[in-house]
Image: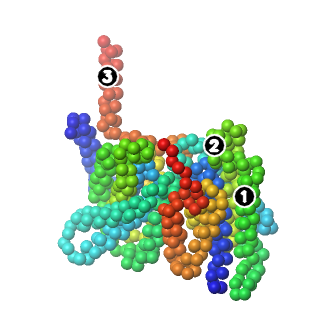
Amino acid sequence: MDHIKKKAYLINTIAVVALYLVFFVLIQTKTMNNYFVGIAIMTCIMIIMAMSLNIVAGFLGEMALGHAGFMAIGAYASASFSMALIDSGLPLPQLVILILAMIVGGIVAGIFGFLIGTPTLRLRGDYLGIVTIGFSEIIRIFFINFGPTGGAAGLKGITRLVNFHNVYWVTIIVAFLIFTLGRSKQGRAIISIREDEIAAEAAGIPTTQYKVLAFSLAAFFAGVGGALYAHYQSFLEPSKFGFMFSIEMFVIVVLGGLGSITGSIISAIVLTVLPEMLRSFAEYRLLVYSLVLIIMMIFRPQGIFGRTEFSLTAFIESLIQRKNVKKSIGGGEAS
Amino acid sequence: MNLFLQQLINGLNVGSIYALIAIGYTMVYGIIKLINFAHGEIMMFGAYFAFIAATSFHLPVWAVLLSSMVIMAIIGVAIEFVAYRPLRNAPRLSALITAIGVSLFLQNLALIIFKPDPKVMPKIFPETIYKLGEIEISSTTLITIGLSLFFMVLLDLYIRKTKQGRAMRAVSEDKDAAILMGINVNRTISLTFAVGSALGALGGVLYSVAYIQVYPTMGVMPGLKAFIAAVLGGIGIIPGAMLGGFIIGMVETMTKAYLSTTWADAIVFAILIIVLLFKPTGILGKNTREKV
């Protein structure tokens, strides 16, 4: 690891810990009440969902409109697993149960991502979009009709294992993993497919394999997000994972900028917190939301960040540089 | 056998409505390559205008249909002008998100204007029931199927025989070449939205008459299914949309009658997926070879 990289890791780690401490103090001193903590937890879950969708929509550049389906699979799988585990009476600490449940949810969703992705990824563009909608609707209808997980009435009695502290760190870890994926050999292969599939293939990249990899990874992280959602809400109903929820996630990703992880994070925060802030307008809330969406797309169609990432190190460096420039100008005047 | 024939007629009824709505999706997609998510909401507003025309103004049937179609044609053109035209050269996904935004906007506008509770759509067509042996056909069903077929034939003639229709086909084939040939592309696109929205509105009115209800979110499910119909037939191809609409309507009715009501939607989606896996551009779609 060279010097610049080390510095970047150090700065980002400090920033992440500092942000956590701010929230920690706010929660401990009750400045943030349960309502706001709830919003913060939902925001973290939406950040995970948006980042995972960004692997397919941003890195791979394919239209995937069925992300809620994978989230549902992860949620139901992890919830069934944790309920069985707790019923079995093993004396495990809550955090361990949550971690195991997240892994189970992620893996089951990832397997379904693999199974669905393998045949469908030969379709392109809008056709792929509609097929992913189709699969996620089939998944939802399956859960409506599936007795063992409560059917249409929903799955009740999931132990609530998620609080702000663990969801925050999971989000950080997922962000780190997806970010490094984008910089890895595999990630660059996936991005090259987005840029030009034929050229990528000519350069010796097994495109189908990497497409399925991207799709399964996205499904895996969506499953993790679903597991967190299940263990936060402690109640699951199939109607939550409808077509509109997938669209909502897709909107977050496009608004943040396709392929920009930091963009997804910022956009997930804005689009989760904004509707909550507008609650006092009640019925005009979604009207404003949709108007913001239209205006935003007309004036900034590439999203908030486009394809670039916000870099804290570069930001700090530019601040320091500006100070130095000021100093040198000041020095010039003095002499 | 009788049950089967009865279901066949029901399937035609639902299918013709889906076909009408699917045409709007496919025309817009053909010409600007945009999935117009707001089309389901155009259909919903069309139904509301017909409801108002029938209950508040007591207009005759033809005036109810015509007024709703004309108003929605104007609104459709306005939506294109305000929301889609500025994005014509932007990335396609941005236009898609805008379409989603417009769809949400119209839905919530309807929630505020008309309130969320469903209204009962009056029977605007004269109601008599014809009996053929043991099969019952209501005049509403006959009128629905007849009107849909009439407008489909009209549209087909319009697209194939008139100058504007030829311009539409030219623009959807190659926009730049169409400009060079002196076709007013902007006007042609507006016209496409007008025709598509008018047919969507008609579909909405017929749908609300068939299900006797009007409510702000009524456009979502039929909109999605009509979209599936358009993709199934091969998106961008008008006869494909009609065929897809009838197939989806028939499959839905038959699964509801013989298999299961709760799984009907899942089976519709499964058929779409299977067809697309074997024929990735839809039933009537042509395979275009990729050039490097």
Residue A31 higher or lower than B134, as above or below: above
| Residue A176 visible | yes
The residue at the point 32 percent across, 48 percent down is A186
From the top left corner, tell me how far across and down residue B63 is, in percent: 79, 63
In the structure shown, which secondary structural element does the residue marked by tag 2 occupy?
A: helix
* Mark 1 vs 2: CB contact within 8 A: no
Q: Residues within 10 Å of mark 2 (few under 14, many from 20)?
A: some
Number of residue marks:
3
In which quadrant of the rendered view does residue A72 lie? bottom left
| Residue B81 visible | no
3D distance between C-alphas at marks 3 and 1: 74 Å
The residue at the point 36 percent across, 47 percent down is A205
For this rendering, which residue is in front, A253 or B116?
A: A253
Q: Earlier in the sequence, mark 1 or mark 2?
A: 1
In which quadrant of the rendered view does residue A316 lie? top left
Q: Residues within 10 Å of mark 1 (few under 14, many from 20)?
A: some
Residue A256 higher or lower than B278, as above or below: above
For this rendering, which residue is in front, A262 or B196?
A: B196
In the structure shown, which secondary structural element does the residue marked by tag 1 occupy?
A: helix
Tell me the residue that label 1 is attached to: B156
Q: What mark, if any, has residue A327 been given in the picture?
A: 3
Tell me the residue that label 2 is attached to: B175
Q: Are marks 3 and 2 on the same chain?
A: no
Q: Are marks 1 and 2 on the same chain?
A: yes
From the top left corner, tell me how far across and down residue A218 is, in percent: 37, 56
Disc 3 chain ID: A
Amino acid on which the number 1 mark rests in the picture = Asp
3D distance between C-alphas at marks 3 and 2: 56 Å
* Mark 3 vs 2: CB contact within 8 A: no
Q: Nearer the viewer, mark 3 or mark 1?
A: 1
